[in-house]
Each structure stands twice: as structure tokens, then as C-alpha cells.
Image: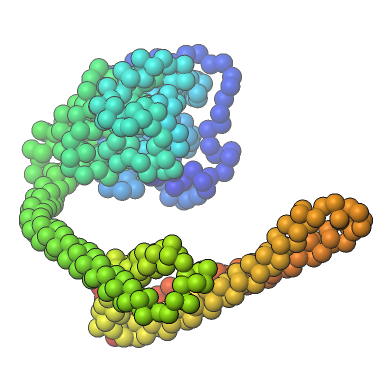
Amino acid sequence: MGIIQEETNSVKPKQISNYSIDEHPAIDLNGDIQFDNVSFAYPARPDILALRDLTLVARAGEITALVGSSGSGKSTCVSLLLRYYEPSSGRITIDGQSITDCNDNALRQKIGVVGQEPVLFDTTIYENIRYGQLHATKGEIEEAAKQANAHDFIMKLSQQYETIVGEQSVQLSGGEKQRIALARALLKKPNLLLLDEPTSALDNASEKIVQEALECSCAGRTTIVIAHRLKTIQNAHRIYVFANGNIIEQGTHATLVAKKDSKYRQMMEAQQVERTENEIDERVLGVQLEQNQNQTRIGVLASRVIQHTAFSVSGSKLTQRIRAKAFAQLLRQEMAYFDLPENRSGSVCNRLSSEALAIQELLGARLGVICEAFATIGFGFSLGFFYSWLLTLILFVYSICMFLISFFQIRWQAQLNKRSEGIFGQASALAAEVLRNMRTVKQLSIEDKLLQQFSNLVNQTFTVRRNDIIISGLLRGIYWGSQTLLLFMLYWIALIRLEHKQIQANDALMYI
């Protein structure tokens, strides 16, 4: 409900229908809905009428469709019917009774709304559907999901109805979100169903599934449909064509299409041409993508097999040569060499095994990753210089600076760790010595003195670590902040070069 959402934030409180808790006579939504000479202007644009003396009737138990261009007043009708706003003039009645005589909350409880962009909360699917009727049972919730064609795909999820939809429903597709929103609307068993372009943002496959669910849901209910795709409302009992806040045509699909110069027919023909072109483009593009994807898969698979095999074999051969040469050097040593504690047979065998293996881990598969990274960087800069040498040069200088910052940070961290290890070693040695000679310490009454020494050593590590945190924070701030500045500079220079027609827009977007 795009127009509704855009305008709600800018209106004044006195011009919005207030939430009412007063008791009003119950209204019967089983009757006809009538807009009688309704005019309305949004408070943010009081000089522009969104509706001009609008008169229309939605018959009970029938499907009424509202079509027209954006901003013609279709969604405004839904806003007024839900009493988000009050008409500037005229009145809206249901079965002859004005909706102003009804409690707002009671009215909305009898109306099911499904919008173009369904809003789901960051909780489970079960809870999102239950929001339609808080006192509903589990069986009623599952029945509503079945009516909305949502039960089957929900049961295929790992947690089924307990699946968390995530923030902004990132875990679900557009069609799945729409069906859950429909199930939530159907749970309250509404007498009136308002559908505000529910399939306009979906692909063809999702649209078909959602449309089938909508058609089943509309049976026997008074339904008002706002449609962008006219093929979805061909079965409507009455179609109203909007333009500039008023109705310019009305009738059934057959009668409107039969008129040669009708606005509805022009819209229908334009959408048929667009749909045909899109279907042809999708088929051609689909064939090309499928061929390219097959070739890409084969190439990636072959290159990965060759890469890992080649580097693993080379690493194994290197390990073999290192062990052979190391063993040969050991055989040339004098006997006194093996008398040293660190050169006993167990230590020598361990070095032959572990040190050669460490070299293999560095130069085997890991060397392949390093080569891949350098190749990617080289190819990326080469391609960048081809499209825009200036932007690439800026990025190259930035990369060098980031490399130097990372290098100095790693070097600083290594020196810091070395100093910290030395201090921790002294503290550990002092603690061990005290524990071994606890009786002597107590005899001499030097507990406070030794505790002070230990505290001084620990405080040294704190001072060193504090400086490390400050410097690391500064370097990380430069690193992350410079990325934003880099993007700003790249976009700024790209816009300047685009303005002077030195590069093409597609090249700039591809590079950035």
C-alpha cells in the first residue's frame, strides 16, 4: 500500500481518523460498499485532490477491481475505507450505514488486507499468522495457511511453523511472504477482503501460486482489488478505471475490452506487448545463461582439480626432498652432536617429521591460495586500468597504503607479543618460585614485597596492552574509515568524468 505508507508520516494528527475505544453500533460488512461523492486531499498536499467527487459501488459477495495509473486514487480509496483518513466531503457507507458510525478497531477486524509489500515481523511464521487473530487455535492457523497455499512450503522448512522469518523477512521469498500475509488476513475470517496489488512485485511463477490462493480466498467474500496486471482481474464482476482521482470507465472485462478507444483496452494491449517481449527475452536469456553456466561449471571444476592436485603433489615432493636432505645432513654430523639433549633420537625424528610437514603446509595447498589471491589482484587491476586508469590508480595507491598499514600492524603486534611473553614469563617464574619456597617466604615475612613485584610485572603487561589497544583501534579506524572515503572519492571522480563524457556510465558502474 505504497501511497498509504508515504503519506501517513506527513499528516497532522487532527486530520487522521483517531483510534476510538467508544462503543458504537456494530456494522454489517455483508452489504454493498458505496463511495458517495467522496473528495479527499492529503494533509501534506491540501491543494491537490486525490479523489474528486468519487462515486462507486462494490456489491456484496462480488469482486470489484480498481485499475489505473499510479497516483490516480486507487490506494486512497483503501485508506479511506480503513479510516486512516476522513473524507474532505461525501461519505462512505456499508449497507447504507456510514462507516463513521462504527468503532475503528471493530471495522478493521472484519477487513482482511493484503498489500503489495507484505510486512512480517521478526518472529516465527506461526506468530506472524496468529497476529491476524490472537485467540486463534493451532488448527485454525494451519487451516488459514492451507487456504493461502502456504501450508505445504511451510512444512518443508526445517522448523516448519516455528521458523524465524528474520529481519525484514530475509529468510523468505516474495511469494512466500505474500502467502503468509494472506493467511494472516484470512485467519480473522473477514467479510471484506482488500487486495492492494498483491502480485505486482512477484515473478511469474510466484504470481501464479499467489493468484490461485487469492481466487480461492475471494469466493463468497466482498472483495476490492487494486490491480496493476490486468490479467489478474479478468474475472472481476465490476472494473473501475481511475484517472486523476475520478472514474473514467466502468464495466466488466468483456465490455471494456469491446470498446475500441477505451483506456482499459489501451492498458490491456500495452501489457500484452510488454509481457510478450519479456517472455521472449527471458527464454532467449535463459538459453544463453544455461549454456554459459554449463561452460563455467566445467571450467571452474577443471581448474580447481588441477590447482589442488598440482600444488598437493608439488608440496609432497618438496617434503620428500627436504626430509632426505635433512637426514643426509644428520648422518654427516659428529658423534658429539648427538650427545646434546636437544639432539637425541626422539627429538631428531620429531624434527624430521614436523618441520618438513610445516613447510608442506605453507607451500602446498596454502601456496595455491596465495597464488590465486595474487592472480585475482593482478587480473582485477589489469581490467580496471582497461576501463578507467584514473579510478584504478586511486584504488592501487589505496591498496598500497592499506598493505603498509597492515604490515606495520602485524609487525607491531609481533613485537608486542614478544614483549608480553617475556613479562608473563617473568611473572610465572616468580609465582612458581614463591610457591616452591612458601615456608621461606613466610619465615622472612616478605609476602608483601613479592606481591608488589608480581603486581608490577602484571601492570607492565596492562600498560603494554593498553597502548596496543589504542594503536590497534587507531589503525582499524583508519582502515574502515578510509573505505568509506575511498568509495566517496571513486564516485565523485566517476561523476566528474561522466559529466565530461570521458567514460561510459556502464564502465563506471562495472568498475565501482
Q: Tell me the residue at 49%/81% (across/down).
A: 404
From where the camera sits, is residue 320 visible? yes
In front of the other: 349 or 446: 349
Pick the front one: 416 or 110: 416
Tell me the quarter of the image containing the C terminus. Answer: bottom left
Q: Is residue 332 left or right of residue 108?
A: left
Please give the count of numbered marks on the rendered protein.
0
Q: Is residue 114 above or below residue 279?
A: above
x%, y% of residue 272? Answer: 11, 47
- Residue beneath the point at 42% across and 40% down: 166
Q: How is the image coloured?
A: rainbow
Observer-nearest of 313 and 211? 313
| Lateral position of residue 501 relative to residue 393, left or right | left
Residue 176, image x and y in percent? 29, 36
Residue 494 can be seen, yes or no: no
Residue in the image at 34% along x and 48% along y = 71
Q: Dividing the picture into quarters, in which one does residue 360 lie?
A: bottom left
**Rendered view: 11 above or below 377:** above
Residue 134 in the figure: left or right of residue 220: right
The N terminus lies in which quarter of the figure?
top left
Residue 196 placed where, x, y %? 32, 36
Give the quarter of the image for residue 443.
bottom right
Q: Which is more toward the observer, 88 or 312?
A: 312
Please provide percent x and percent y for residue 63. Answer: 24, 26
The residue under the point 27% across, 22% down is 146
